[in-house]
Image (spheres, grey):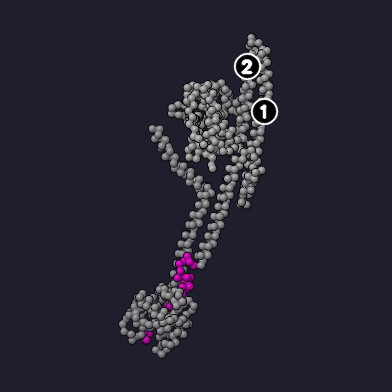
Amino acid sequence: MDGHTSRREDESSRPGRRRGRLSLLARSLAGRLVLVGLVFLAVPVLVYERFREADQQNQILLLRSAQQQGQLISRALAPELQRLDGSALTGLSDLLNRFADEHTRVRLLLRPSTAKGRTGEAFYYVASAPAVSTAMLDLERQRLIKQGVLVRLAASCAGDQPLAIPVPTEKGGLELLTSIAPVQTEMGCWAVVTSHTADAFGGTSRPYWKTPEVQAAALIYLAMAAIVMVLMLEIWRNLRRFGDLARNLVQSRGADPRGRGLTFTAHNTVPELAPVAEDFDRLVATLHNSAVNLRRAAEDNAHAFKTPIAIIRQAVEPLKRIVPAEDTRGRRALDMIETSVERLDGLVSFVRRMDETAADLLEPPRQRIDFSALLERVLLGYRGVLEERQVHLAPRVERGQVVRAGEDLLETIVENVIDNAISFSPPGGVLRVALRRVGKSVEFTIDDEGPGVEPSNLDKIFERYFSQRPGGSGGGQGGANLPVRAGEDGMAHYGIGLWVVRRNAEAIGGTVEARNRDEGGLSMLIRLPLAEG
């Protein structure tokens, strides 16, 4: 039942995790860079389609205008053609030149009234303006016949016909036959053919994307897109350099980053990010100085307090020999002094550890540490304690697991977790310690056979001053009322061991979690990232 419930909860949480990943991608610079790239790809397609449709509409209007122009030319020529006789045909070219220009061509075909049959073959060219070779005119005539235009015209010699028939020119280009208009006279059926060059339609002979305007706009757009993409990539690269620098900074523990040239200002290449880089440098310098001052203060304060404590402890020894055993009141006073001195000594050590932990949080050390070798060395030092407590150790340590941390910081994590597990292990119990690699992380687990932890307190055990040891209330406040509890080992406990473990692990990019074992006892899992390279 619990397995099914867990599976249903996991399935129900998947949409939330998926939405979270999508939201993170949308907010990230890389996601926005991809979005900008998609916009730059989509906009030209949409704009090109709109402009192409507009160009097509413009072409239609130009074609209609050219067709109407052809009809007007035919109407202007009709009176002249009505007055013609056979002897005046030689002057037709001069007549057509009045209506022709650099883009407009006018040609005349005639089907004499004496022609037999109603086929398109009865039409032949009699004039052209400007002049065109006989071969080109014949090619044009054959195309009109094939299209059926002259056949329909021969049947009735009536009805203007708008056209859009491309024909080649002598210079290798194309022109468009736009209209053919009939004029019936006594000589026969005249056909006034008008055509226009491709330039008159803005380059109809080539695709729209090959027009100079579109190509110029495309070059400007590509240049703009390239500038925007380069700018965003430069910002991204600069932020990556900031990230690399931040990793180098955390590996330079104890050294002033400014003295080693590790500054954000020196690595910045974007002028607009200069104020940000300066703020980062000031923040790093402040954190570095704070960490140095905390460590120095912890050491100085501990030394200052330890000296009078040692003097008090030494002064009590001769008093113990002087006060007779039957003086119960004096003996009780000496015992209270010794107990208070021991407690004061423990409090001094506790405060020092707190200050050093705070300094490590501000400036965590990041050297390459062989976690496997360190763990084996620490476990070897617990041999006497384990024998005294009659606890059996079952280690499984994979060799060569390296992490980035400080040796003291990592050793504190291991010792506090093992101390906690030993203090709760019953005589004859087994303490299982394992270290193994899982993906890009190292997992350090400690399983004991103690009483475990109330499920509601599994997360609280990592809070400061929280303890479930007998005699404690389960929590407390700092200051003079620090919760001090004596465990079964007779030592004072302040409820900060697991808090230090979690703070240290998180300072070097790790996590800590606890769970109750099905077989009884507590299992602690510490996951740390493997050192790269």
The answer to whether residue 317 of the structure is visible from this angle is yes
Q: Is residue 79 magenta?
A: no
Which residue is tagged 2? 335
The residue under the point 62% across, 52% down is 271
In this view, the residue in front, 242 or 429, is 429
- Start-end of magenta stretch: 183-211
Q: Quadrant of residue 93?
A: bottom left
What x and y, as percent, mark residue 13? 44, 40
Q: Amino acid at mark 1?
A: His
The answer to whether residue 514 of the structure is visible from this angle is no
What x and y, as percent, mark residue 391? 49, 23
Is tag 2's residue or tag 1's residue first in the polypeptide sequence? 1
Q: How many marks are shown on the rendered structure?
A: 2
Using the image, tell me which numbered label, if any, was put on residue 303.
1
2 or 1: mark nearer the eye = 1
Image-based side of 83 in relation to 291, left or right:
left
Q: Secondary structure at mark 2?
A: helix
Q: Quadrant of residue 499?
A: top right
